[in-house]
Amino acid sequence: MKTVNDKGYKEIRGYLSDLHKQETFTGAEVSQFAAEVADALNDGGSPMFVIAASESKSGVDEICIIDDEGYDIEYFDMDPTPRGRNHHNTHDCERYACRICVAFEH
C-alpha cells in the first residue's frame, strides 16, 4: 500500500499555493488531494493529481507530480500466491484492501 508522507503533503501544498486560484487550504482539503495521489499510486499510476483548468491560475489543467520521496510504500508480510479462501484467516481483507482478494476476486 502506498501513502503520501509529510514531504508529499508539503509538495501538494506548494503546488496548490503556486497554481490554484484558491489562496488557502485546510488540512482536510490538502488531504483530499493526497488521497487522489494515493489512489493513483495504488491503482498502478503515477504519483500525481490535477488542478482543473477552472480552478487553476493559468486557466489550463495543471498536472502536479509528487517526487518519489513524497510517498511511502508499506509491504505486507504475506505470501502473494493465491491460496483460495484460507488466507482470509490471516488478515482482514476488507479493512486492508487485500490485493490478493482484488486480483483473484475472492
Image (cartoon, grey):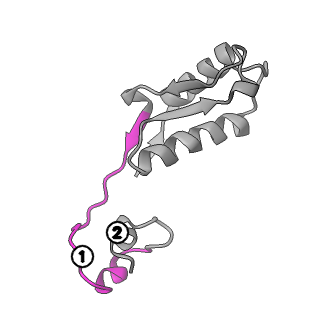
Q: Residue at x 46, y 65 (%)?
A: 97
Q: Residue at x 40, y 67 (%)?
A: 98
Could you tell me the amino acid type at mark 2? Ala
> Residue 82 magenta-drawn?
yes
Secondary structure mostly seen in the magenta stretch: loop
- The part of the chain drawn in magenta is 71-92
Residue 82 numbered tag: 1
Residue 92, compared with residue 57, is above or below; it is below
Residue 17 numbered tag: none
Earlier residue among tags 2 and 1 = 1
In the picture of the structure, the residue carrying the numbered disc 2 is: 103
Residue 72, compared with residue 74, is above or below; it is above
Contact (CB < 8 A) between labels 2 and 1? Answer: yes
Q: Name which quarter of the figure residue 17 lies in.
A: top right
Mark 2 vs mark 1, foreground winner is: 2
> Residue 45 magenta-drawn?
no
Residue 20, compared with residue 102, is above or below; it is above
Find residue 28 and report its horizontal and vertical position in percent. 72, 40
Image quadrant where one finds the C terminus: bottom left
Find residue 16 and report its horizontal and vertical position in percent. 66, 22
Q: Residue at x 38, y 47 (%)?
A: 44
Could you tell me the amino acid type at mark 1? Pro
Find residue 61 and report its horizontal and vertical position in percent. 63, 25
